[in-house]
Amino acid sequence: MKPLRIVVTGLIAQHPSLGGVTWDYLQYVVGLARMGHDVYYFEDSGQWPYTLDGGPSGTEWIAHDCAANVRHLAGVMARFGLEERWAYRFPIKARWFGMPHRRRRDVLATADLLLNISGTLHRPADYRSVPRLVYIDSDPVFTQVKLALPRGQRKFRKRVDAHDRFFSFGEALGARVPETGHRWRATRQPIVLSEWADAAPPSDAFTTVMSWTSYQPLRYRGVTYGQKDVELRRFLDLPTRVRPVPLEIALSGTRHVEWETGDLGPLPPAAGEAVPRRGCTASDLLRAAGWRVVDAATACGDLDSYRRYVCASRGEWSVAKGGYVRGQAGWFSCRSACYLAAGRPVIVQDTGFGGVLPTGTGIVSFATIDEATAAIREVHGNYARHAAAARAIAAEYFDAAHVLTHLLDEALRADP
């Protein structure tokens, strides 16, 4: 393939203390650049950026001054030789940072392709000077449900419809997911494998990085599509079943009570006896049930600490969002792909990915707490075999050069 001029969108500046989010978008940019393409990163989400520390009061999470966010983005881009190839629009004052206006305009006028990762562009129609706009759906099931809702999502549909090609991390979209009128082509997270090579010995803990809730649940035709708070409660007793193997969660400190699904029934004994039913935080609940809990912003808030956290783990154990489990669309986590690239096995809740990824060794899926218990014991007891398989799966299925070549081929292919 001849070199292309490509614009990639994302949320690196908006989320300066989420190392995993930075890696998600960065691996598109770095992967394409190392393939020889002329790549630029634009961030124009229309969303207010977050502060690094909660501001003067410690509870002010909206940044009215974006200087720290811009420094973060500039540092990340410079680290990978992309210091002249980024632009960030601060929505409060409609001010651009990074590339000067003339250069930004020239890039858009001559680009071959724009990859709108996670639909992060606020007004994709403003970028119609690019001949092909590509929507990358990293949140399958939720995306399709939002598009299918009869009211309240018209702006979202308009944003999606402004694109020419549609890709989804839901590699097995089927009857459980609403039709939207789009042709969703399969894709997955690209991983720059050289950034995850690690020779350090793993620790004794299976870990993950997560938020209790990421946004409010959706309801469509009598079905609720929930968040991780729904699923994790089903597995609260797991630490007591797999002792002495420790289970640890790097948990986001931000809690959105209004997004939680609510009372999901009786708690398991270990948690129910130790924690009052009211006024209980997610951290309280997990610790009472025997989980190790660390603060995600401290443990893995930037590129390096996130990578160290993943590489220092014995492997990953994680639930998925309730909507992914209910939809069975084949979603597989960007984070889990990084664990695999580091040679760390992943034990993850089944979302229907067994038809597109190899499972059983390196990747072990589960649906029940008994299956999760057996999976942890199997991986822990046969660790070398699972670790070798994890890296091999990453090389075969997630290598950025392979994933992005397929994506570009499909994105540029003429309509039948």
Image: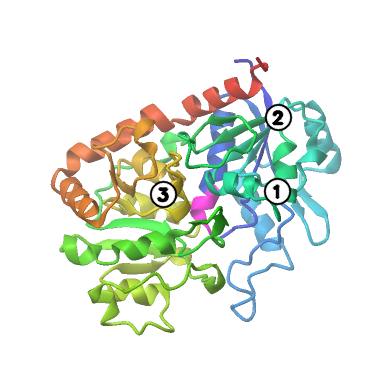
Is disc 1 in contact with disc 3, using a CB cutoff of under 8 Å? Answer: no
Q: Which residue is mark 1?
A: 156
Does the magenta stretch mainly form a helix, a strand or a loop? helix
The structure residue drawn at horizontal position 77% and vertical position 43%, both measured from the top left corner, is 99
Taking the image as drawn, is residue 53 in sight? yes
Q: Earlier in the sequence, mark 2 or mark 3?
A: 2
Q: Nearer the viewer, residue 406 or 145?
A: 145
Q: Nearer the viewer, residue 46 or 325?
A: 325
Q: Which residue is mark 2?
A: 164
Q: Which mark is residue 323?
A: none
> In the rendered image, which quarter is residue 394 located in?
top left
Residue extending furthest toward the right: 102
Residue extending furthest toward the left: 381
Nearest to viewer (mark 1 / mark 2) = 1
Q: Amino acid at mark 2?
A: Asp
Q: Tag 1, which secondary structure? A: helix
Q: Nearer the viewer, residue 340 or 304?
A: 340
Q: Earlier in the sequence, mark 1 or mark 2?
A: 1
Taking the image as drawn, is residue 197 in sight? no
Where is residue 86 shown, x and y percent of the image? Answer: 70, 43
Q: Which residue is mark 3?
A: 325
Vertical placement of residue 231 versus 88, above or below: below
Segment tinted magenta in the rendering: 18-22
Task: Say if the magenta span includes residue 175.
Answer: no
